Image (tube, rainbow, N blue to C red):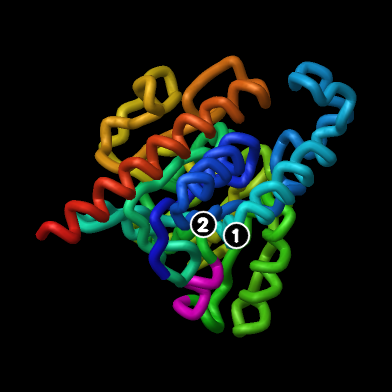
Amino acid sequence: MSYDVLVIGGGPAGLSASINVRARGRSALVVSNPLEENPLWRAEKVDNYLGLPGLSGAEMLAAMRRHAEQAGVEFLAGKVLNAVQMPDAWYVSVGPDMYNARAVVLAAGVARGKKFAGEAELLGRGVSYCATCDGMLYRGKPVAVVGYTDTARQEAEFLQKIGCSVTYFDRPKQCEIRGDGRVESVTCDGRTIPAEGVFILRPTMAPTELFPGLAVEQGYVTVDRRMATNLPGLFAAGDCTGGPLQVSKAAGDGLIAGQSAAAWAAAQERREKQS
């Protein structure tokens, strides 16, 4: 599927960006986790959003989502696993599927949690971030699912249904993955099991993991006044660009990023027609 702009993240920044993309007549796809996994959802009351004091975070997010739906924004529940820039577009994999867009807005919030010991070294050698993508490789084998999302148990059940022997770790505080060239075992919170695959399911990935070469400073994505990053056609908005980590700031960032991404997509379309 092709879009003018693909937005990663369905919080205030991402929804604001998508609405402003649609306001300029461009197609927009928002890829995000369920609303309930957004940190704002758990806020009992938001008192500092101009003109709308006293709403709960859940009420505010639901209203923003309805606004985006009414604007014609398309939504996809899932996790972006990879993004590659080609001369004509960005190609983004969501689970086993591929989407392309002329521009991308990164609005996935702040990645929380450090990598586990052994995770980076064994990535692609037993460590995976997507059960539906890689599960069949481990059919009939022992695997561990390390879940930090509300949908992680569903992915564990999927692995079980296709014949994996699954051990589920629910939001462990510490894990270590061991193996000589490939995953052989995993230890979480003091419990060790043999495993040939480890599926680590976090709400979001660090921006530099999705976009190699992306400029960051003190862990936050570096942007200019147009919310443009150092990678052509990639814009960023919201908490991932730094503080203050507030809804108002995120929505404003999203507005600018959405307008900039729509303008980039329009210019890219003109270049395509001229070539």
State the residue at coordinates (61%, 84%).
163
Indicate the secondary structure of the residue bearing disc 1.
Answer: strand
The residue indicated by pointer 1 is 75
Left or right placement of residue 14 versus residue 103 in this view: right
Residue 139: % across, % down: 53, 82
**The N terminus, quarter of image:** bottom left
Quadrant of the rendered image containing residue 226: top left
Does dot 2 land on a helix, a strand or a loop? strand
Q: Is residue 131 visible?
A: yes
Which residues are the magenta region?
131-137
Q: Residue at x 54, y 29 (%)?
A: 238
Marks 1 and 2 close (CB-CB < 8 Å): yes
Against 51, residue 263 (above or below) is below
Question: Which residue is the site of mark 2?
Answer: 29
Task: Determine the CA span between mark 1 and mark 2.
Answer: 6 Å
Q: Residues within 10 Å of mark 1 (few under 14, many from 20)?
A: some
Type of amino acid under label 2 = Leu
Quarter the C terminus occupies = bottom left
